[in-house]
Image: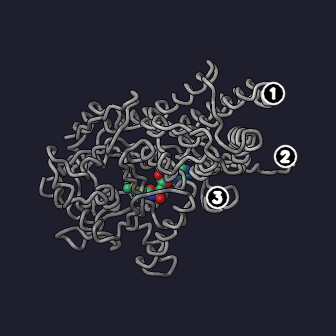
Amino acid sequence: MRVIFVYNPRVDGMSEVSNQKYYITTPIYYVNDIPHIGHAYTTIAADMLARFKRLDGYDVFFLTGTDEHGQKVEKAAREAGVTPQDFVDKVSQDFRNLYPILDASPDIFIRTTESRHIHAAQALWRHLEERGYIYKSVYAGWYAVRDEAFYAENELIEGKAPSGASVEWVEEPSYFFRLSAWQEPLLKFYKDNPDFIGPASRRNEVIRFVEGGLNDLSISRSTFTWGIPVPGAENHIMYVWLDALTNYITALGYPDDFSAASHLSPHPSQQFWANALHLVGKDILRFHAIYWPAFLMAAGLNPPKRVFAHGWWTNCGEKISKSLKNTIDPAKLIARYGSDQVRYFLMREVPFGQDGDFSEAALIGRINSDLANDFGNLAQRVLSFIQKNAGAAVPQPDPFTEEDEALFKVAHQMIDKLRTCADEQSLSKMCETIWAVVGEANRYIDAQEPWTLKKTDQRRMNTVLYVLAEVLRYLGILSCPIIPKAAAKLLDQLSVPQDQRTIAALAHHKLVPETKLPAPQGLFPRIQTEATT
Ligand code: MSP
């Protein structure tokens, strides 16, 4: 049963949401290696959406964390010559350290080795067992440690997994989940919930896969020990994906708090769950869009609201891999270019959902054109003009002209456009929406020529500067989710109070004439390259 929310009508006609829940998750990352660009990408995307929804008055719960069990992690620990526990403690911390660097704002960082998670995963197992969806048999088939996935013979391509990972033959006693029983219910679920999988092209792939038939899934391993013990069969550990996927409900208090709710008096965790969005890479969509809803429905729980699969980055046209020595360290990139710059590039460069190609030249291009020339320059022109020619304070406007109102209108229209894009996870479109207004404001300043008005009509000059400062306030508030540092700096320079940095405040407040403004500072330094020096 989904929880229905009531939208609070808004005084000025804009729909304001109050107290509505929004739950957003990244995949929990394997701790076999240091963080790379793929981890940074999903985390920044989730952070951008979490920040946008907070800005829009939602009660947001943003979850990320580390996936610490399984053969891959056990193998990495062995190679490092330490115990799995010591190994995961160290690498998990490397991931945790990345969040401030990315300027990401998760509410919870979960680890699958925590006791509350072990409790939750075992509870889910018991529910599946009680409801008759688990049976014991023997698994004999292929397994790819890199993907932590089982593959049927007919899925292999030239003796490898479709992902290119090496496979090994595994034969061991195993518990199975009756996935085959969920083929029809899943197809019905996809039909009844057309927005469950995004983008639409991925949804079709998943549906085709499920239509092709589902085999029962091996959900325990008995030939190694680094995992969560199967309740009542301690010589088996749970398959790492069943363990890992459970993290999304562990964080909401499953099983204790989660099932304490009814739809009449929903527990907050149920309200978050009814609004859950999982962001994942395209390679792990199958686990999230097929296995996960099947596990949940089999346990008598609702699937999440939506799963969105993003594409993969290549590096200068090449697949990123350790063996090619072309991995991209997000921390190094940010140390060189800045977190706002890297966040903006990753979100703007490629439509979210499609594959993209990374190159430093493209990153520098975006920094110099979109950030320094377009946005930074607009702010600098307006604020330094006010500083020099309008008494370093918000100018007093006269009644607005049609041109002024037209610019206010496009600024205001950003709000609903951004809301729609956020709900479709169209993240690059969110950037485009804001930069379209940056462009309009730059055209307005060129057309209005405040530098000429300074000599001919100072009152009109003040009005033009007020309009531009107001539009900068819109741009500052609405760009917070993408470029939080620069946006805060801009809002400081406009003397916007901290408690007025929300979408609701855009309509309820305006810049107050005569408010003192501090001396402006550039938002985005240009990057000098050999070609530009
Ligand atoms: N532990 C699992 C997820 C469990 S969620 C219940 C896992 N971890 S991972 O660390 O291997 O992968 C994390 C994410 O990184 C995946 O979403 C994957 O798509 C993403 N990426 C890995 N390389 C990538 C690129 N080159 N580009 C973009 N994303 C990439 O899978």
Gap in angstroms between the C-alphas marked 2 and 3: 21 Å
Q: Position of residue 224 (x, y in %)?
A: 34, 72
**Left-right relation of 529 to 471:** right
In terms of sequence position, does the residue under pointer 1 or pointer 3 come before the other?
A: 3
Q: Nearer the viewer, mark 1 or mark 3?
A: 1
Sequence-earlier tag: 1 or 2: 1
Foreground: 499 or 77? 499
Residue at disc 1, secondary structure:
helix
Of the residues shown, which amino acid type is indicated by label 3? Answer: Ile
Where, by quadrant of the figure, is residue 108 drawn? Answer: bottom left
Between 296 and 437, the residue placed more toward the observer is: 437
Q: Residue at x 71, y 38 (%)?
A: 382
Q: Which residue is mark 1?
A: 452
Residue receiving disc 3:
334
Q: Is 238 drawn above or below residue 54 in the view shown?
A: below
Q: Position of residue 337 (x, y in %)?
A: 69, 55
Q: CB of mark 2 within 8 Å of CB of mark 3?
A: no
In the depicted structure, whether residue 491 falls above or below residue 218: above
Q: Quadrant of residue 469?
A: top right
Q: Is residue 167 visible?
A: no
Which residue is disc 2 drawn over?
532
Residue at screen point 57% across, 61% down: 101
Q: Report the front residue among 360 and 500.
A: 500
Amino acid type, mark 1? Thr
Badge 2 local density, few (<14 within 10 Å), some, or many (20+)? few
In x, y percent, where is residue 158? 50, 50
- Determine if the C-beta at disc 2 is less than 8 A from ligand 1: no
The outermost residue toward the right is 533
